[in-house]
Image (spheres, coloured by chain):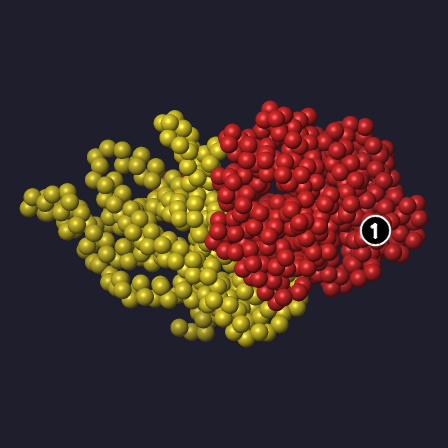
Chain colours: A red, B yellow
Amino acid sequence: MRMVKGSKFTVVMLLMTLVIGLLAGCGGENKEKSSNSSDVSASSGSSENTASKSPDSDKEIKLRMATQFAGSDPWVPAWTEAIKAFEEKYPNIKIVDESTPVNQEALRTKIKADAATGNLADVMFYFNGSETKMLVESGEIVSWEEELQKDPDWAALFNSSILEKVKYEGKQYSLPYIGFYEGLFWNKTLFDKHQLAAPTTYEAFMKAVEVFAQNDIIPFATSLTTPYLQEALILSLVGPEGQQQVYDPSWAPAINIIKELNEKKAFPKDALTLDDDKAQALFSGEKAAMMFNGSWTAVGLSKNPGIQITPFPLVPGGKGENMIVSGFGSGWYMKNNEDKAKYDASLLFIKFITSPEVAGKFAAIGGTYAVQTLDSGNTAELLKAGNAMVAQAKDFVMPIDSYVSRESYTEFLKGISYVAHNKKSAEEVLDQAKKLSDRNKG
Amino acid sequence: MNFKDKRYIVLFLAPTVILLFAFLLYPLLQSVYYSFTDWYNFSNEKTFIGLDNYKQLIEDPVVGIALRNTLILTLGAIVLQAGGGLALALLTDSVKRGFKFFRTVFFFPIVISGTAIGLMFSIIYNYDYGLLNAIMRTFGIPEQVWLTENSSIYLVLIPILWQYVGFYFVIFLTGMSKIPEDIYESAQLDGITGLQKAFKITIPLLRDVIASCLTLATAGALKVFDVVYIVTKGGPMNSSELLSTYMYDKAFNGQNVGYASTIVITMMLLGVMITVLLNKAVKKDTISY
């Protein structure tokens, strides 16, 4: 009998512990980002580590933030530090960081679901272009003209031509911030070792592919499931105007170059299943000689002084010489809060994050900027070369996925593998993507 | 039964009914509606398009691949998962020592999440630093690209089978423990061998357990997602696509929720159909000892 009583007591205790544990777990759901410690040193210049008064300093305000600065995003340390500095400066404002990685479309899905359910975050760093439409349709976001007019000093921090470029239907819903560029990264040490010329012309590029393939070095690190190489080839072949002709048959020869490169063993053997991180690792580990990728990879690569960057060479008969895929694909959006205190706090945060001091911290990690940045003085040579490439480029275009439907674009990307392995023709892939694009013009 | 009793029945059943309706039936009915709409980008705009999504589904070559792969997976689950579980249970039951050790080892993969298993196998199959190619290098054999168009579905089958074989193993062991010992004792007096014991006594007496396991294995195979998504993402070139991975791809990568809902309804109908057929094929007579 004692045993039975004892075991009943144990079961009751266990159940209570479980219930208390669950309740405690639920209670901790408010994921307040109380600023984790960051690797990036130095406080934000504007924060000065002294508490300032926000517009309604008696009331505690919670601001929800949804950005891409999460997971393996290179700007996570700068973002974490910025939140910490902001919360120190305005102690009555608490940041609830709902940042989500862009991988696997997680951020897109989150923001779209938030918009559909009327639950948008107060501040968002999100895509421009076709994605702005969805946010505008929600009727919940601020158009920045009035605020920029009210604060000319703050407005002067932005590059006006870039502001103009990211307007949607003539209105400024997004404030551009970090820009990106895509370029051909190449390992000069490996090129010199095999006495090869820099891959600045198509002939030199193809010669390098041939020589490296013969010498058991992967000529070109890429996954056939990522968009960068085809973006470069299409722009090089058809130029900026042609690139705007969505899935036009004129793109086919560019896609066929991928098939040609695959036949010449230019890609890693597992390019069909490789992901972009592993492709980058092949290049940074000097197992591959070239890689076409975005400016976000430049910081990691800049530790190797042998890595250089150049625009993708002009393909035979091409119209896109010295033109690059670049732009301000994302920007700061703000919810049009009816609660004045929240509105003001959100605005305060946007002004804080776009200040030259904070933007300077982001700039030290990489990218080009639409706002003035305070030079941290330690910009790596590769980043300087990237910025020089952008400065010398004849024209810029946004990536294809910024103006086509997601479904058509994912089908198009998948189709590249089929073309590379001769399972479908480039024309078939383009036709399939065009049909999906026509069905959903959104 | 008086009214007072009924009131308590309603009271106690209400939470479950409400939860089931809110989180299962209502979303399911909504999905049926969405499958007849053009709904992109999780927007608030949905356009009724009748059977267009179903027409697209019939013409979609990837759906054909996904159905073929689902069939392979279902057969694999029935033969290797349930069959493997039974074989392991029979073998373990007859060992004199180490019963607890084997039981723990075979059951262990069940407690690991599918995501972790998927990650582990994606590392095993990796071309550059994977375990399989490391073994190949050790023996001086050229490295292989393991996940190819022809092999991918079979290679993702391995972790799925490995993960769940222990589950059926435990179910069979429990079933076997209920078979009265005196049946075996009298058979032993008649000079029965180990194999005869398994085929003439244990398996026939486990018939109802086997029927339940077959239903569970089939239903489980139709729900597989995590391991395949982590190891291959349905690739290369859609070769390991399942209805579940294709649905996810259409809903979250392609943001075409209407078409993804059509795939969901197809999965559900397929599941119901196979389960009904299987239940009819393997009659679950209760066996009394």
- Residue A54 in percent (x, y) is at 86, 45
Against B157, residue B285 (above or below) is: below
Q: Relative to the observer, which residue lies in front, B269 or B40?
A: B40
**Quarter of the view holding residue A71:** top right
Residue at (10, 47) in percent of width and height: B187
The residue carrying mark 1 is A163
Left or right: residue A148 compared with residue B178: right
**Quarter of the view holding residue A185:** top right
Residue at (77, 43) in percent of width and height: A393
- Residue A358 in percent (x, y) is at 81, 37
Residue at (31, 64) in percent of width and height: B279
- Residue B155 in percent (x, y) is at 39, 45
Can I make out residue B148 in this image? Answer: yes
Left or right: residue A151 compared with residue A313: right
Against A176, residue A73 (above or below) is: above
Can I make out residue A107 in this image? Answer: no
Q: Quadrant of the N terminus of chain A?
A: top left
Residue at (52, 40) in percent of width and height: A264
Q: Amino acid at mark 1?
A: Leu
**Quarter of the view holding residue A43:** top right
